[in-house]
Amino acid sequence: MSKSVDFQREIRRWLEQNCPGGARGVGQIPFGSRSIELEPEVRLWLERMADRGWTVPTWAKKYGGAGLSNDEYKTLINELKRINARTPLTGRGVNYIGPTILEFGTEDQKTRWLPQIARGDGGWAMGYSEPGAGSDLASLTTRAVKNGDHYIINGRKIWTSDAMDCDYIFVLVRTSPDKPRHEGISMMLVDMSQPGVRVSPIKLISGESPFCETLFEDAIVCADDVIGGLDRGWTVGKRLLQFERSTHAGINISGSQGGRTESSKLPALIRKYVGVTDGQLTDASIRTRLARHEMDTHAQQITQRRVIAELHSHAPGFTSSAVKLTNADNVQDGDELLIAAMGNQGLRWADENSEEQVVAGTKRWLYQKSLTIAGGTREVQLNIIAKRVLGLPD
């Protein structure tokens, strides 16, 4: 019997015995936040998977992982899908800053931060954009000034997703204002529990407030928590963005690739609102749009699997921009299609006559407008694809 078959059987047996029913199907997924109470079986699932190193399967064992090869990793993911298990841990810790520390951090930084991240001990926010520095990130003005064995940070970050529930934030700051703007930037890890960090949620048109503004007023950062070295933040920050875009694209194997995959619920929903005659949707234009969307979704899933299979490192390079953008476009297309099928019902907000599913669809349609902004705007991704993937001239 081959080692791969033995490994698969071992995983299957362990998952059947250790994955609680409350960690299967739709439900809560931890991202490390200490302020969010976990359901008992969700916490148990996280602890058991962390003990095995399977919250970050490809990381080395000394950093909290299991040291799995890419093939072993794919076997684990397939077995999680088979029992419809949720990923035990997600978020910017395991998917963004963890892989970045793994690549650019000192041995001391890896030893201090990575096992903690792998256990889900602390949620992470992302401090990149500023009110005056969005797509032109290199114009950021948040300052960090050295003071003995620490830095003092002052400035403002915007669109810091989930910051109200996070414990730490990785921040790009200007450390050498006299250098060219791309060269005087550093990446630092900041404890958000200190008085010098204030968070204000920003309400979106969907009514939700996952995005925040984060203010730094004499916030303190240990000098040992500069990742990648002083004034090398632009290089480190760009690499982290590749991990972020890979996660948005569903092709990141550096952290916690999700185990569950849902089959499309769109056809059933659209049949409900449009109606069916002789086995076909009564609206021909909606029928055509749905067929095209389902084909695009299938093609996207195949592309994701192909890119994962071709990875020789833990995160793809500029390919992530292409897959991230097409994935976001396809999700938004599905939202538009559902709203069109709902007709006037799809424009309701909330009243006693509105179905919960209708209101949820409308809010999701509005919220997911952010997909072509979050993780890199559509225009930035198109520029990267043109220059770095297609090799087109400036």
Image: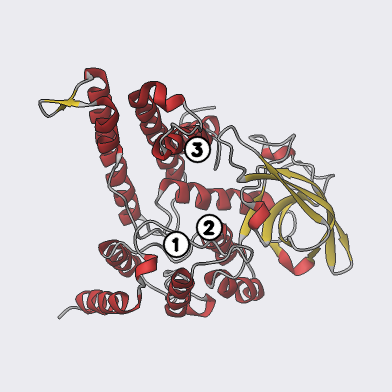
Mark 1 surroundings within 10 Å by alpha-carbon count, few (fewer than 14), some (14 through 19), many (20 or more): many
Amino acid at circle 1: Ser
When the figure is inspected, residue 132 is found, relative to residue 177, above or below; the finding is above
Tell me, yes or no, if residue 20 can be seen here. Answer: yes
Q: Which mark is residue 371?
A: 3
Q: Which mark is residue 256?
A: 1
Q: Nearer the viewer, residue 31 or 341?
A: 341
Image location of residue 305, percent across then percent down: 30, 51
Helix, strand or loop under label 1: loop
State the CA–CA distance, disc 2 to disc 1: 8 Å
Image location of residue 43, percent across then percent down: 49, 72
**Reading the chain from its start, which is encountered first: label 3 or label 2?**
2
Image location of residue 299, percent across then percent down: 27, 39
Amino acid at circle 3: Leu
Q: Residue furthest front?
A: 352
Q: Are marks 3 and 2 in contact (CB under 8 Å)?
A: no
Helix, strand or loop under label 2: loop
Amino acid at circle 2: Gly
Q: Nearer the viewer, residue 116 or 356?
A: 356
Mark 3 surroundings within 10 Å by alpha-carbon count, few (fewer than 14), some (14 through 19), many (20 or more): some
When the figure is inspected, residue 365 is found, relative to residue 40, above or below; the finding is above
Q: Which mark is residue 91?
A: 2
Q: Which quadrant is home to the C terminus?
A: top right
State the CA–CA distance, disc 3 to disc 2: 16 Å
Q: Are marks 2 and 1 in contact (CB under 8 Å)?
A: yes
Q: Which quadrant is home to the N terminus?
A: bottom left
Mark 2 surroundings within 10 Å by alpha-carbon count, few (fewer than 14), some (14 through 19), many (20 or more): many
Tell me, yes or no, if residue 390 can be seen here. Answer: no
